[in-house]
């Protein structure tokens, strides 16, 4: 089984006053680097980061992609990554870069993946209410790549569920700390993050 990763890191950080969430630090490590490390721990053969370039990108050894125009949402960013060069992987790990503990999320996804029926297109984590967290999942690369071109306007300003709508995806509840993310100043304080 081969896995590629797409890390979504292109938001405006509006609820954080425009702070680039990818560069927020927890325990001295940026959220982006935490997501990249989690993808590497899963054995990802390639990692695409959808978002603006950063100074340390050369050291990160990732491919950068960007939705066009920028800031048109995570669905557009995901479509941009999926319509680029095919990494040839069986599965695509999708992670939002603002996850506090992407290592825990990836570990749960990899534990749950072998339990899926053979006709399932992937698994994503869900919150306590069962609401899918589409940007914390692992999906069959082939079906994602087939679904991407069907989204109108290359996914610009579309909900990610539009991309996932016709796929057979299992949503598995996860503990709150597994899917916790940094969206607001309160989140940043709770996890003792720095800018």
Image: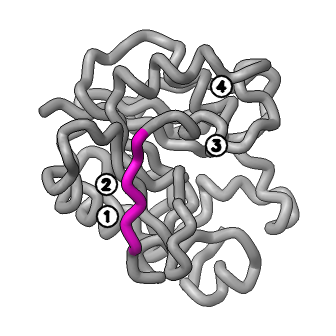
What residue does disc 1 label?
103
- Closer mark to the observer between disc 3 and disc 2: 3
- Label 1 vs label 4: CA separation? 24 Å
- Label 2 vs label 4: CA separation? 21 Å
- Among numbered discs 2 and 1, the one appearing first in the sequence: 2
Query: Looking at the image, can residue 21 be seen?
Result: yes
Residue visible at 79% across and 49% down in the picture = 12
What residue does disc 3 label?
160
- Closer mark to the observer between disc 3 and disc 4: 3
Marks 3 and 2: CB-CB under 8 Å? no
- Among numbered discs 3 and 2, the one appearing first in the sequence: 2
Task: Return the residue nearer the eye: 84 or 53.
Answer: 84
What kind of element bears circle 3? helix
What kind of element bears circle 1? helix
Marks 2 and 1: CB-CB under 8 Å? yes
Classified by dominant secondary structure, the portion drawn in magenta counts as strand
Residue visible at 18% across and 39% down in the picture = 118
What residue does disc 2 label?
38
Query: Vertically, is 34 above or below 62?
Result: below
Q: Is residue 193 left or right of residue 157?
A: left
Marks 3 and 4: CB-CB under 8 Å? no
Whether 172 is among the magenta residues is yes
Marks 3 and 1: CB-CB under 8 Å? no
Q: Tell me if mark 1 has few (under 14), some (14-19) or many (20+) residues whose alpha carbon lies within 10 angstroms of its own.
A: many
Q: Position of residue 147 (x, y in %)?
A: 53, 23
Q: Position of residue 98 (x, y in %)?
A: 57, 60
State which region is magenta: 168-173
Residue visible at 30% across and 41% down in the picture = 120
Q: Position of residue 82 (x, y in %)?
A: 50, 22
């Amino acid at each position: 089984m081969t896995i590629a990763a797409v890390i979504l890191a292109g938001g405006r950080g509006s609820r954080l006053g425009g702070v680039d969430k990818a560069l927020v630090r927890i325990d001295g490590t940026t959220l982006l680097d935490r997501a990249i490390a989690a993808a590497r721990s899963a054995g990802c053969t390639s990692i695409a980061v959808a978002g603006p370039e950063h100074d340390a990108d050369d050291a990160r050894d990732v491919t950068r992609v960007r939705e066009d125009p920028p800031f048109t949402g995570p669905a557009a960013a995901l479509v941009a990554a999926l319509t680029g060069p095919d990494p040839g992987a069986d599965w695509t790990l999708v992670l939002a870069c603002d996850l506090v503990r992407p290592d825990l999320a990836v570990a749960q996804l990899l534990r749950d993946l072998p339990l899926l029926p053979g006709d399932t297109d992937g698994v994503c984590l869900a919150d306590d209410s069962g609401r899918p967290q589409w940007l914390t999942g692992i999906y069959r690369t082939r079906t994602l790549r087939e679904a991407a071109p069907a989204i109108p306007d290359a996914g610009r300003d579309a909900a990610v569920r539009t991309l996932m709508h016709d796929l057979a995806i299992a949503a598995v509840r996860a503990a709150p700390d597994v899917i916790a993310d940094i969206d607001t100043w309160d989140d940043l304080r709770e996890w003792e993050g720095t800018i």
